[in-house]
Amino acid sequence: MEIQVKSQDFWFLLVCLGLGILTELSFFHGTVGVSYLVFLTGFYIVFFIRFRLLVFTHRRIGLLLMMAIWILSASYLVYDNQLFYQLNFLVIPALILCHIVLITVPKQVKWYTPRFLQLVMEKLAGGIRFNSVFFSEIVKSLFKNMDEQTAHTIKRVALGLVIGLPLLGIVTILLMSADAVFQDLVVQIPRFIFQLNFGEQLFRIAIILFFLLVFFGIFQVLALANSTKLYSEEVGNGTKQFDSIIALTILILLNGVYLLFTAIQFTYFFGGGLEEGYTFAEYARRGFFELMIVTMVNWTLLISFLTYVKESRRKFKFVLKVMYSIVIIVSGIMLTSAFQRLSMYEEAYGFTLDRILAHGFMVFLLVIFAYTMMRVWLEKLSLLHFYLLASLIFYTGLNVIPLERMIVNNNLERYQATDKIDVYYLNSLGATGVDGLITLYQKEPDFPNLKRILVERKEWAESINQRNSWQSYNLHKQAVIEKLTKLNLTN
């Protein structure tokens, strides 16, 4: 990589230093709340100013990505879901990287191919190489402008430090052993440094410098002029294919079993009957995971066969399409059965985040299978294109929907009907769960262990109010904390 160091590069380096400081302030001072939106605002201001003269490409998918990024970041301000709190620390940076690469590369690049993911990784690695070359050029230019004697003097000073510092340490230890007063004086120095919290400040400086290099390297690499030939799609003529006879044999065998299974399902499960010796809850727990695994196997087979099975004979191709369609229809029936099983299991044992997410994932799979059915008969449709878009919208939607509020409300409704509720699980849901416990306490103040949990939560709320920083501000959490502080638990 060859670069020319320009004066504006040093100014942009200072801008990235400011962005590094903003990153440290946003993410390394307690729980993240509104600070994620503050960081995102600063990041995109720097990005759009840096590339203000560039004509952005892939605008529609770029706009969708940007909307998803802002919605996911806003969840840190609006919601208090611990699962997505952790996941989004990985998802949002990945989406940001994909977004800034996507809108700055030539329009010939297809974002829904594996080549684009490879390109993103190349840009990330290119940022590291850029930093190495950039600072090497600076060092070279510094020594280049010096006369030979000055450069030689600096090298000798550096060599003297390398030799002298270890020697200084040995001599200091010997002198400390020889004189107690000198020893006390030397020992006081690190104590003074630790009182200044020097270690923490050094750590924070290291974080700032790290993100300075990350932002500077990536932005500079994206700004480099590249030939569109570098982004051409590599299309090979030797794509591996799977034998259509083998695929058809596999599909016929599986569909035979699936049709038999479906017939049995309709005779008693969908019809309202039940296998002898099982309660609904036991039957639901027994079959849910097995059905989900079979459905995922079917999905994998469909993707593989649609991608690698090529058949030119019209009648044979039609038979394959029929077999594909049967697999999809049966998979839909299995998903419906699994959905019902999970619903019965929730009625018996309560609602949890895992079970709600499983419901959502099954709906997502139904959409995926519906599109795959269209792809079977309309061969020009792209599977990966739709799958990526659907996954992005689905994940963003999960962050927007108040899942924990749904869980709390459903469990409170179930309590009204069955007098059963797991207060410890509600407590584990964070602010939303605590809000549900407050509602339960107002109706049933004598519920076992409920008052003790709320007393502990009230102490937590008081401590949070005392040490909370602006970075951690969260609308829902703050509202629940105010409810807790006003709650009378002395009765």
Image (cartoon, helix red, strand yellow):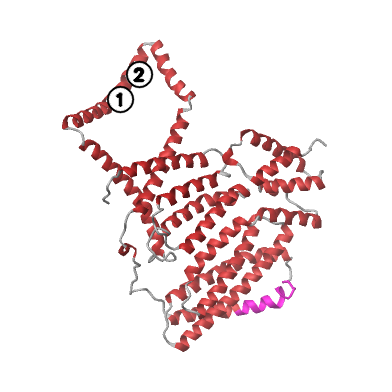
* Quarter of the figure that contains the C terminus: top right
Q: Residue at x 34, y 66 (%)?
A: 232
Please give left or right for residue 398 compared with residue 383 in the image: right
Please give left or right for residue 304 compared with residue 151 in the image: right
Q: Residue at x 71, y 40 (%)?
A: 482
Q: Secondary structure at mark 2?
A: helix
Whole-percent x, y for residue 368 in the image: 55, 70
Label 2: how many Cα within 10 Å (few below 14, some 14–19, many 20+): few
Q: Residue at x 68, y 48 (%)?
A: 432
Whole-percent x, y for residue 69 in the image: 52, 54
Q: Nearer the viewer, residue 86 or 424?
A: 86
Q: Residue at x 77, y 41 (%)?
A: 451
Q: Which residue is mark 2?
A: 173
254 up-or-down from 417: above or below: below
- Label disc, if present, on residue 165 of the rendered structure: 1
Q: Secondary structure at mark 1?
A: helix
Whole-percent x, y for residue 32 in the image: 56, 43
Q: Amino acid at mark 2?
A: Ile
Dominant secondary structure of the magenta stretch? Answer: helix
Please give left or right for residue 312 compared with residue 72 in the image: left
Q: Nearer the viewer, residue 441 or 15?
A: 15
Whole-percent x, y for residue 233 in the image: 35, 67
Q: Earlier in the sequence, mark 1 or mark 2?
A: 1
Label 1 or label 2, whichever lies nearer to me, is: 1
Q: Nearer the viewer, residue 43 or 371?
A: 43
Q: Which residues are magenta?
A: 259-275
